[in-house]
Image: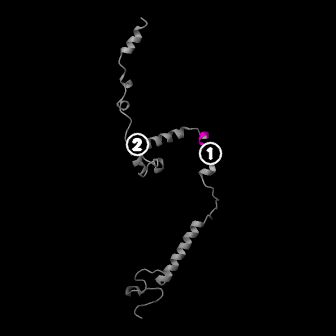
Amino acid sequence: MADEPSSRAASAPAPHYALPSLCAELPEYTNAEADAIAQAFRSGNFCSLKDIPNRLGCGSVARHRFRKVLKSREPVAACGSYSRRSAFSEFEYIPSPYSMAESIRRQERLHHESQAERFGGGAWRAAGSACPLRHEAFGRADGFSVYQ
């Protein structure tokens, strides 16, 4: 009687969630190498040309990617000593003056004003303001009249 529950469990079918899926029965994805090469030439992708081996052959991209995964799993001490100076270049910090943007804008404005003086013949005037019109002659403060 002790053997009866174990024999009943062996003969019962497995529940649906324990059955192998279609993905487990199919072979490994065979177009992964072509996809990796195509992704290397697309913008906005994490795979770059440096991740593709120099010589392409059957299975070479997959082997290269597998080696890269294995290398990333190694401990840091096995890969070599990490040095901060080799990761980034050293530079000397030179502070810029606080009002640098304002002085650049001032220089540009003065340059544009000098160009306007040089090529435009003076300060900018709106059209029709060089000479007063007939209806403007009366009531002007400077007393200028067109009829004189």
Percent across and percent down for residue 74 are 56, 38
Mark 1 vs mark 2: which is more N-terminal?
2
Above or below residue 31? Residue 20 is: above
Q: Please name the amino acid that badge 2 sits on.
A: Cys
Tell me the colour scheme of the image: one colour
Which of the 4 quarters of the picture holds residue 5? top left
The location of residue 79, given as percent across then percent down, is 59, 42
Q: Which residue is mark 2?
A: 58
Viewer-proximal residue among 5 and 148: 5
- Front residue of this view, candidates 20 and 132: 20
Q: Nearer the viewer, residue 114 or 91?
A: 91
Residue 57 located within the stretch drawn in magenta: no
Q: Name the residue at 57% across, 66% down.
A: 101
Quadrant in which the N terminus appears: top left
Element under label 2?
loop
Q: What residue did someone put label 1 on?
A: 82
